[in-house]
Image (tube, rainbow, N blue to C red):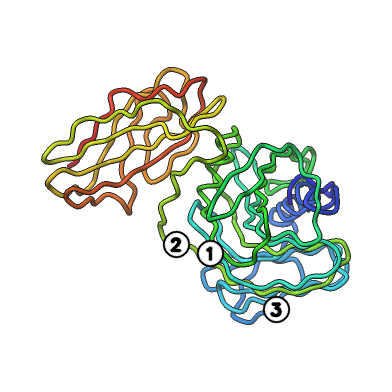
Amino acid sequence: MPAIRQHGAHPHRGRRSLSRLLVGFGSVLALATATALTPGSASAATQICSSQTGNNGGMYYQMWTNGQGSACITLNSSNSYSTSWSGVGDFVAGVGWNPGSNQTVSFNGSLNASGGTTLVSLYGWSTNPLVEYYVIEDDQGGGPSLGSFMGTTTSDGATYNLYEHQQVNQPCITGNNCTFEQYLAIRQGNTTSGTITTQNFFNAWASHGMNLGSLNYQILATEAWGGGSGNDSITVSHGSSPPPSTAPPSTTPPSSNPPSSPPPGNGGCTATYAVTNSWQGGFQANVTVASGSSPVNGWTVHFTLPSGQTISSLWNGVNSGTSGAVTVKNAAYNGSISPGSSTSFGFTATGGNSAPATGVSCTSP
């Protein structure tokens, strides 16, 4: 888990709680994934009680244990699992995707735990930069010490505390002795059922300069350490192409910069650019793409960012260029716009100012 752990491979070693996360699980799982875990395949209602990764009905799964006490995961179906543990030293298990994505994740389950610390979280890695990240939905018996507090963000009806922590000379998904960042979002108020709009957390971290690279595996994970016992049951799923939220990524004051809004036409498309949030060193913008009196089947937006501004993450579109002249084409799911309707894409960017883009225009085939 977060850099909290001191143990090379698992995030929990350091503080024995969330802090261990940082140092422990991710590292451990990372190392396990790179060198120690045994790849395999599984069928429904398969119980696994040793370190292993594999695929089950199109879903990726992981089981990692440090061998102390007992811990098992039962794969009930491709997207449903149960875990049980007793006197556990440290284990992490769950199902998800490899690679991960920014898609919205839904989960539903139950948790019974006593002693030690238990977490339920969306957990994953990215490379270039190398980052271990957690969206922690339930933390039982925690009270972890977590690195640097970066602020808060609101998503899916809950508020999350954001933390960043650097790990040095720890195991990771690329091997041993790695230096990497850990990004944490910890829910205020526990839950074992809900929705995780993943892009909201990517945006929130990016708003603090905490950028992700190419996504590696991503799982809805149960983790426990510290000698406790318990069991849980989780079902997880994700949307095929849900549009990420364009709400402000964190609790920072909105910008007052005026939007750029070309006059609408009778055909083709128009684009309206607006800065929706700003903070020291960065901002978030939203671009609304609208049709005229005719439908739009595919759109391309052009704009020029002022000097010093660079896009760090973009959603609901496919961009060419991150600074200066930028082109954004529709995503696979939002290219068709009925007459008189609109869609939008958004992005976060770094830069010393949040001055609006210029030359905003839209074309349609």
- For marks 3 and 2, the one nearer the N-term is 3
Q: Which mark is residue 106?
A: 1
Mark 3 vs 2: CB contact within 8 A: no
| Element assignment for label 3 | strand
Q: Residue at x 43, y 17 (%)?
A: 307
**Residue extending furthest toward the bottom:** 45
The answer to whether residue 90 is left or right of residue 193 is right
Q: Amino acid at mark 3?
A: Gln
Query: Which of the pair 308/293 is nearer the observer?
Result: 293
- For marks 2 and 1, the one nearer the N-term is 1
- For marks 3 and 1, the one nearer the N-term is 3
Instruction: Give the number of the mark in front: 2 or 1.
Output: 1
Task: Tell me the crowding category of disc 2: few under 14, some 14 to 19, or many 20 or more residues within 10 angstroms, Cα based.
Answer: few
Mark 2 vs 1: CB contact within 8 A: yes
Q: Residue at x 63, y 82 (%)?
A: 45
State the separation of the CA atoms marked 2 and 1.
8 Å
State the separation of the CA atoms marked 3 and 2.
27 Å
Q: Which residue is mark 3?
A: 47
**Place of residue 329 in the rendered image (x, y in percent of width and height, measured from the top left):** 31, 41
Q: Amino acid at mark 2?
A: Gly
Task: Tell me the crowding category of disc 3: few under 14, some 14 to 19, or many 20 or more residues within 10 angstroms, Cα based.
Answer: some
| Element assignment for label 2 | loop
The answer to whether residue 267 is left or right of residue 226 is left
Q: Which mark is residue 239?
A: 2
**Residue extending furthest toward the top:** 307
Q: Residue at x 16, y 40 (%)?
A: 268
**Place of residue 112 in the rendered image (x, y in percent of width and height, measured from the top left):** 75, 73
